[in-house]
Amino acid sequence: MQITAKISSFYEQARIYENSRASDLPNFVEPEKNSRKDSLTISSSFAKKTKEQRGGATEESLSAEEKAVVEKLKQRDAEVRQHEQAHLSAGGGLVRGGASYSYQTGPDGKKYAIGGEVQIDISPESEPRATITKMQQVRRAALAPSDPSSQDRAVAALASKIEAEASAELREQTSDELKTAAGSNVSPQAKKALNAYRKANEL
């Protein structure tokens, strides 16, 4: 069974914000307690204007305050897309689908990405060596952005845990193979190598 994890630029738990708050955007208010964290809300002074401007507002028709909001949203949009692209590039074939985004409509009526996520396959492989290689790539993908989110770091930690388990399984397999070889007709050189391995790994 394939297992995937979300590496993202916002949402707590399954998805998180990338160290941003609604209050960082001028004239925006924090989401209500029972609302989704990605639903930033335009303050009441702009709500009506924004709805009216969706029909085709131009930048010239916006107030200086509204233009500041648009600039903040543009900056956030660029940061989010860069963050998710880093995940996609490093994740390669382990990424399941493209990036998905959550949007906020600005005073100019345009939609801007304020958060995003990428799903990546974290299923262990049938062989420990393959699992180790895979988890190393998962960790690189999770930490690829210059500013990994809490969720990114959590996925990287999970990949490290799975990798450690696979490494332990591989050591056990190698130990069993060496013990089997020790009981057969092997050369003195092979026995010497076995003893050195046992000593190094405290078998």
Image: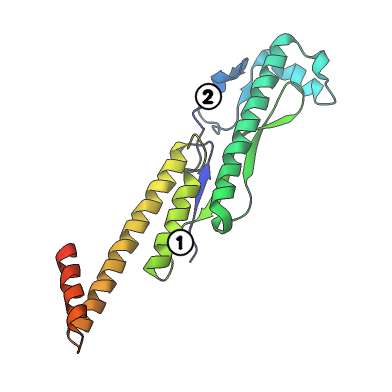
Answer with left or right where residue 76 lies relative to residue 130.
right
At a point 60% along the width and 19% down the height, the residue shown is 25
Residue 192 in view in this figure:
yes
On screen, residue 171 above or below 7? below
Residue furthest to the top in view is 64
Q: Residue at x 82, y 14 (%)?
A: 61
In the image, what residue type sits under mark 2? Arg
Q: Residue 45, image x and y in percent?
A: 68, 12
Q: Quadrant of the C terminus?
A: bottom left
Q: Outermost residue, right direction?
A: 56
The quarter of the picture where residue 193 lies is: bottom left
Q: Amino acid at mark 1?
A: Ser
Can you tell which of label 2 and label 1 is closer to the viewer? 1
Q: Residues within 10 Å of mark 2 (few under 14, many from 20)?
A: some
How many labels, in total?
2
Q: How is the image coloured?
A: rainbow
The one nearer the camera, 154 or 47, is 154
- The CA span between labels 2 and 1 is 33 Å
Which dot marks residue 70?
none
| Nearest to the observer: residue 105 or residue 199 | 199
User: In front: 123, or 12?
Assistant: 123
Q: Pointers 2 and 1 in contact (CB under 8 A)? A: no
Q: Secondary structure at mark 2?
A: loop
Where 3 sits versus 79, above or below?
A: below
The residue wearing badge 2 is 21
Crowdedness near tag 1: few (<14), some (14–19) or many (≥20) residues, C-alpha within 10 Å: some
Residue to which mark 1 is pinned: 123
Q: Residue at x 55, y 34 (%)?
A: 36
Residue 122: percent from left, percent from top: 46, 57
